[in-house]
Amino acid sequence: MPIKNVNHSLWHSLRNKTSARDTYVATAENMAREALNKIEKCEIALPKAAKPENHDQIIAVRNKIKTFVDHINRGKDELYRNKDLANMSEKYWKNVREIYTITKFLWRYLFATQARAEGERSSHQAPALWAACQALWCSVRTGEPGTH
């Protein structure tokens, strides 16, 4: 796809979705933390409520607490696994965006240089262009913008 035909709304959409994802993740983490705090309070209060006549109920409540804690921990594990995947994809898209920006700059520079070269020859433009091309190639080769 030529650089001039890039749909900039895709970058904004990706940024908005990333922001929404971060908000949902923070909300989920807070809710899990609150649930674990409430469960902890329940576990602390449980021995105080224990009596010989409600022994079976206490065991049932302890089993439910264990089930809730296991469920929350599984949810947190899945959340962090997905969060790691999202971070990798976000890093990839940041690299794509930076390479796009560098490439766009280089094309503009190339065409501006070509237009000026027809009217004047400047010896300092060629080394600067060559350095920019080398930097772009290193970024593409390593997958990390700015890394040589």
Image (tube, grey):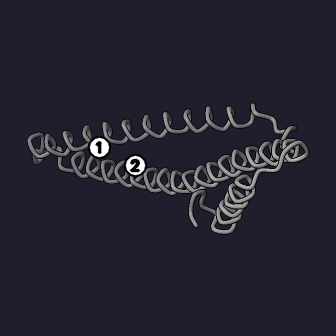
Q: Secondary structure at mark 2?
A: helix
Point out residue 105 in the picture as x, y percentages from the top left corner. Answer: 73, 44
Task: Name the residue nearer the viewer: 38 or 2.
Answer: 2
Label 1 amino acid? Leu
- Give the image location of residue 11, x and y in percent: 70, 37
Residues 103 and 2: in front is 103
Of the numbered discs in the image, which one, if any, rests on residue 9? Answer: none
Residue extending farthest right: 118
Is the residue 72 above or below the residue 20 in the image? below
Q: Are marks 2 and 1 in contact (CB under 8 Å)?
A: yes
Q: Which mark is residue 36?
A: 1
- Quarter holding the C terminus is bottom right
Q: Earlier in the sequence, mark 2 or mark 1?
A: 1
- Please identify the quarter of the rendering in which residue 77 is found: bottom left
In the image, taking residue 28 as reference, residue 64 lies left or right, namely: left
Kindly identify which residue carries mark 2: 72
Residue at image coords 60%, 57%: 145
Give the vertical position of 31 relative to 126 (above or below). above
| Vertical side of 27 occupied by 75: above or below | below
What residue appears at the point 67 percent right and 60 percent down from the top-left corner? 131
Q: Position of residue 81 (x, y in %)?
A: 51, 57
User: Quarter of the image holding residue 38?
Assistant: top left
Q: Quadrant of residue 138?
A: bottom right
